[in-house]
Image (cartoon, rainbow, N blue to C red):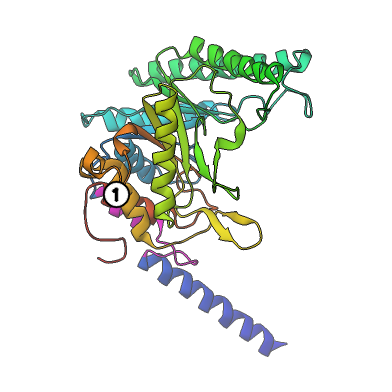
Amino acid sequence: MRVARHIMTRHLVLRAAVTLLQSLSGVFADGAPSHKSITAWLRELKPLPKVHYSYPLDFKTTPEQLLYEYVRITHAASLSGEWHNRKEVDQAVALCKRVNETRPKIPATIGVNYSPWHHRFGKGLPPTDTGPTHHAELEYLRERMETIRAELRAANRRHGTDIPVTCVMLNTERFHVRENDPAWNDAITAKYDAVYAIVQQFFPKARIEWYARGAISPAASESGWTEGGGWFTLKEKGKFFACSLYCLPEIGNTRETFRRTVKNADQHGVAEVTPWIALASGYRRNIVTFNEWDFDWDYDLAYSWMIGAEINHPWFSQPIRHERFAPWNRATIAIFYPPPFDRRVPHWGKHFVAYVRGAHLIKKLPGEE
């Protein structure tokens, strides 16, 4: 018994020593750099030339100084429209205030995420249904937009600021367009337009982004491509198209996704295409199911560096290079999914560092110092 207890004690001491060494070296147990290391790397970098919004920031588990560097570099603090709380709104305003006190060229502002038609509308109901749950869904949206607006106004008063919501990101994957069914499709359009009108009512100056609207994406189809999940008629209210760059190591498909979506935008008179970017995660190839989502994909950092360079540095966006790269000048903003520093994506931080270094053509990857 004494021997077993002695062995257990030695084991615990060794584990504690390993943990301490990992902490001092700036590395997590899974080999990912620590928040301290990521913060130090980001502190050395200039802001991105384009605003980058994201899925909601995690204010509970992400260190404040790391959040500050992130907001300073991306110009945005993004919140959940459904599940934010007053403290998070206050933290977002405080971060933006702190960044803006440095007088950046692009001031830091607020982004809001929301998933309409996924909360109160009856499961299994068709888009043509306009019964009680239809109205409950819209009322819930109205309530959440009113709440976040009121909490933002209160936070601005407390901090003596005027930080606005500049982008509302809408992700709805509930309804699918049908061929030769105009009544069904018109009902989908009407539901999206109702959402758009409510958001615009509360945040009239914010840009409203529909996830995957007009997107042309790789697929297991005859042509190898498909249009954005079939969620949109493209008759709904909206000023922008968007596409998912969720498989960055396949750089050829990444560029072609953006090129094809821009071509689709041109055919519909849409000027801007917003890339949604998955760092250190995404759709990995699968020989059975074509591809499969993986939150923990620590692919070669060079690909995060490359996409950061192409989207942000003007050299890559010149028309003479559109065929070699893509017309990235059509992307005036970008959006990150999964959320920054998501615990499910342990290597997100170092890939974000690589992305920002790429944007500034700093030819050194994290860990090469």
- Whether residue 273 appears in magenta in the rendering, the answer is no
Please tell me in which quadrant of the rendered image residue 177 appears. Answer: top right
314 relative to 61 in the view: left or right: left
Task: Choose between 82 and 12: the one closer to the eye.
Answer: 82
Q: Quadrant of residue 163?
A: top left
Number of numbered discs on residues: 1
Residue 231, quarter of picture: top right
Taking the image as shown, residue 133 lies to the left or right of residue 193, namely right
Q: What percent of the width, then of the height, locates residue 39? A: 33, 51
Whether residue 185 can be seen here: yes
- Please identify the residue farthest to the bottom as the structure is shown: 3
Instruction: Please tell me which residue is depicted at 68% across the width and 86% down the height of the picture.
Output: 4
Q: Residue at x 67, y 30 (%)?
A: 174
User: In the image, residue 205 lies at what x, y percent?
Assistant: 39, 14
In the figure, 334 relative to 245: above or below?
above
Check the picture and name the quadrant holding the N terminus.
bottom right
36 part of magenta stretch: yes
Q: Which residues, given as a range, are shown in magenta?
A: 26-43
Q: Please name the amino acid that badge 1 sits on.
A: Arg
Residue 229 sits above or below residue 148 on the image: below
Q: Residues within 10 Å of mark 1 (few under 14, many from 20)?
A: few
> Which residue is painted at 60% across and 55% down in the image?
292
Residue 91 makes an appearance in the image? no
**Location of residue 308 in the rendering, given as x and y in whole percent from the top left corner:** 32, 47
* Observer-nearest of 139 and 246: 246
Q: Residue 111's x, y, as percent? A: 44, 28
Q: Which residue is mark 1?
A: 324
Q: Quadrant of the C terminus?
A: bottom left
Dot 1: element: loop
